[in-house]
Amino acid sequence: MTQKVQVAVIGGGIVGCSVLYGLAKRGWTDAVLLERRQLTSGSTWHAAGNTTYFGPYAAMTRLFTSSIETYLEAEAATGQSVGFHETGSLRLATSEAELNAYSALKPLYQDLGIPYHVIDPDAVKSIYPLLSTNGIFGAAHTPTDGHVDASGATHALAKAARQLGAQIQTNTPVTAIEKAPTGWRVSLGSETLVAEHVVLAASFWTRELVAQIGLNLPLYALQHHEVITGPVSELANLDTELPTLRDPSAPANIRQERDGFLCGVYEQRPKFWATDGIPKDFKEELLPPELDRLMPELSRVIERIPAFGEAGIKTVNNGPICYTPDGLPLLGPVEGHDGLWLASGFTVGIGTGGGAGQFLAHWMTEGAPSYDLPAVHPSRFSNNLGKEDVLASIKATYERGYKLG
Ligand SMILES: Cc1cc2nc3c(=O)[nH]c(=O)nc-3n(C[C@H](O)[C@H](O)[C@H](O)COP(=O)(O)OP(=O)(O)OC[C@H]3O[C@@H](n4cnc5c(N)ncnc54)[C@H](O)[C@@H]3O)c2cc1C
C-alpha cells in the first residue's frame, strides 16, 4: 500500500532537519525526512560551523540572527549540544568605503536588537591582539555570534523534530518525484509514498532530481577548502577564545580551533566539482586537497596574522559547497508546481539554515512568509538559464568573497 504523508522533506543536512523541526513545531507532524545516507552526509558534516550575524545582504540578516536562536532552542529541547561558542565576529574594513558601508547597517541591527559596533583599528587590535592592523580602517563587530558544531546542531534539530512526532528515514535515497492527482509521488526504489507537500533540501543533488520534471535549477558545487593549523603558542596565552575574523582583502575567514586556527579560503581561481553529474558512488568523502591554489590567499592571511604562518598546516579539507549564481539560497515555493518547495542552494547553510527552516515552515503552514525576503525567492531565476552563464556567475560570486555589493 502506498504510504501517504502531509510532507516529505528530501535531504538530511542542516537545512532539511531545520525545515522538519520548523514544521513539527507548528503542528505539521505528519512529516517524514528522507535521507540518501546518514544525517549530515552532504556538505554539513565538514562545515566549519561559523554562524555570523553579519549578513552579506541586509535582507538576509534575519536568517542569520534566527539561526543561532533556533539551534539553541533545539539544544534546550533535546539536551543534544550544538557546541555554540559565543566568540563574536569581526569583519575587517580594508577601505573607507567598506567602513562606511558597515556604519550604514547600524539601524538594521538596532531594529533587530542585535549588538553591532563599528570600531577603529585600535579597538580591533585590543579585541584581536594577534592581528596586524596595517591597512585596516576598522571593523564591524558582532559580539554575540560565533560558531556551532554543525553536526551537533543538525542532530539537535532532528531530535527535536522527532520528539514532536516527525519521522526521519535514513539510507533512503529518493529516486524520482512526479506530480500525483493529489500531491506528489515520491519514489524510494521499491517503495513509493505520496506527499501533499515536498520540500527539496538536497543541495546540489536537487538540480538532478528535479530535472526529471522539467525544472532547470542553477545549483552547482564548487570545491571549498578549510585549512587547520597546528598549535599556536600565542593562543594558549589568551584568556578568551578569539572572535571569528573575516577579511575581505584575503578573502578568508579565520577562527580559533582549540589551540590552532581554522581558515576558510575564497580563492581567486575556484574549481567546480561534478558539473556534468554527481557521481552515483559519491558518499560523503572529501575531495583531494589542492593547497597550491590557495597560496596567494593564505599569504595574505599570514600577513594579517603572522602567528598563523608560524603554526604549520595540520589538515586541509576540501569539500563540495553548493552555489547559486547570486550566492543566495532558493527558499520558497516552486511557481506553477503546487505543493513543491525549495530549500536548496545554501552556501552558508550553517549560518542561515536554522532561520531558513523556520522561515519556510512558517510560509508552508501559514500560507505566507513571516516577512518579505524576495532575495531568496526561487522565481528570481528563469527556468531557461544556460549552464555556461550560470557557472560564470557562480564563479564571479565566489571570487567576490566578502566584498559587499
Ligand atoms: C570546507 C567547507 C566549510 C564550510 N564552512 C561553513 C561555515 O563555517 N559556515 C556555514 O554557514 N557554511 C559552511 N559551509 C557550507 C555548508 O556546509 C553548507 O552550506 C551546508 O552544509 C548546506 O546544508 P544543506 O542541508 O543545504 O546541504 P547538505 O548538508 O549537503 O545536505 C543535503 C543532503 O541531501 C541528501 N540527499 C541528496 N540527494 C538525496 C536524495 N536523492 N534522496 C535523499 N537524500 C538526498 C544528502 O545525502 C545530504 O545529506 C562550508 C562548506 C565547506 C565545503
Image: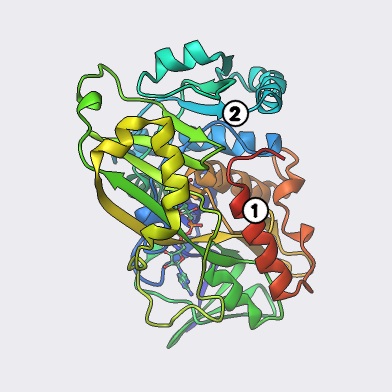
Q: Quadrant of the C terminus?
A: top right
Residue 160, image x, y percentages: 39, 45
Q: Which mark is residue 306?
A: none
* 48 vs 316, nearest the viewer: 316
| Type of amino acid at the residue the image marks with label 2 | Thr
Which residue is the site of mark 1?
A: 397
Q: Residue at x 56, y 13 (%)?
A: 120
- In the image, taking residue 106 as reference, residue 296 lies left or right, namely left
Q: Is residue 384 left or right of residue 60?
A: right
- Residue under numbered circle 2: 94
Q: Is residue 400 above or below residue 89?
A: below
Callout 1, which amino acid?
Thr
| Distance (Cα) linking label 2 and label 1 | 19 Å
Taking the image as drawn, is residue 79 in sight? no
Give percent across and percent down for residue 361.
Answer: 60, 49
Q: How is the image coloured?
A: rainbow
Answer with the quarter of the image where residue 229 lies: top left
The structure residue drawn at horizontal position 64% and vertical position 60%, both measured from the top left corner, is 394
| Residue plotted at (20% across, 25% down) | 236
Mark 1 within 8 Å of ligand 1, using the beta carbon: no
Foreground disc of the pair 2, 1: 2
Q: Secondary structure at mark 1?
A: helix
- In front here: 289 or 108? 289
Residue nearer the viewer, 282 or 293: 293
The x and y percentages for residue 142 are 52, 23
Q: Residues within 10 Å of mark 1 (few under 14, many from 20)?
A: some
Q: Tell which circle, 2 or 1, labels the residue nearer the N-terminal end.
A: 2
On screen, residue 390 above or below 136: below
Query: What is the secondary structure assignment of the residue under circle 2?
Result: loop
